[in-house]
Image (cartoon, rainbow, N blue to C red):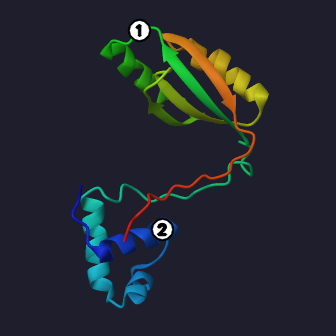
Amino acid sequence: MAALDNIDLQILQFLQANALMTNKEIASRLNLTTTPIHERIKRLENEGVIEKYTAILNKSKLGKSLVVLVDVTLKEHAASFLEQFEKDVLLLPEVVECYCISGGSDFLLKVLVKDMDEYRHFILHKLATLSNIGNAQSRFVVNEIKSQTPVPINL
């Protein structure tokens, strides 16, 4: 874990809330000049604390309003089979999140699609064509109560 002080943590909070916030705006809120803010942000980027900057899009306005959580169980669990599944799932644009999990299944996928027809196509022509799929159980999100990207930061 990187050694972060209170100023670093505040910078990270500001950037998580608005990645377009300028160094000048951050400096003003922290009563500092822009140079140390710029240097700290560069250090946080170089150390990998800040991985990337991105925009959060409204999935419904982009026609991807059906969210499906898919529990996937593999037939074989040798390392090579697990690695192949991980490589294969990276190529599926509908899968926006993939977790290797413990419990009854091996992986949990978060899938975004337009509607049930598009999901059916995804299952039949993409997911089911991957080798080593033993079982896939789908759960459809009825209402999204909380969805956030910020990592909780304790000051």
Residue 39 percent location from the top left of the image: 25, 75
Give the CA distance from mark 2 to mark 1: 42 Å
155 horizontally vs 96: left or right: left
- Under tag 2, what secondary structure? loop
Viewer-nearest residue: 64 or 137: 137
Q: Position of residue 147 (x, y in %)?
A: 60, 52
Residue 114 position within the rendered picture, expressed as x and y whole percent measured from the top left: 74, 37
**Residues tagged 2 and 1 counted as in contact (Cβ below 8 A):** no
Q: Quadrant of the C terminus?
A: bottom left
Residue displayed at 46% across by 22% down:
106
**How crowded is the residue under tag 1: few (<14 C-alpha within 10 Å), some, or many (20+)?**
few
Q: Is residue 49 visible?
A: yes
Q: Which residue is mark 2?
A: 19
Q: Which residue occupies 38% across, 73% down?
A: 11
Which quadrant is home to the N terminus? bottom left
Q: Secondary structure at mark 1?
A: loop
Tag 1 residue: 76
Q: Which residue type carries mark 1?
A: Glu
Residue 126, visible in the rendered structure: no
Q: Give the number of the mark in front: 2 or 1.
A: 1
Above/below status of 54 relative to 25: above
Q: Is residue 44 left or right of residue 72?
A: left
Q: Could you say where residue 63 lies in the image, as x and y percent from the top left?
A: 74, 44
Residue at the extreme front: 103
Is residue 51 depicted above or below 83 in this figure? below
Q: Residue at point 78% right, 26% down?
A: 117
Q: Is residue 144 left or right of residue 131?
A: right
- When asked about the image quadrant of residue 138, the answer is top right
Q: Quadrant of residue 142?
A: top right
Q: Is residue 43 above or below residue 81?
A: below
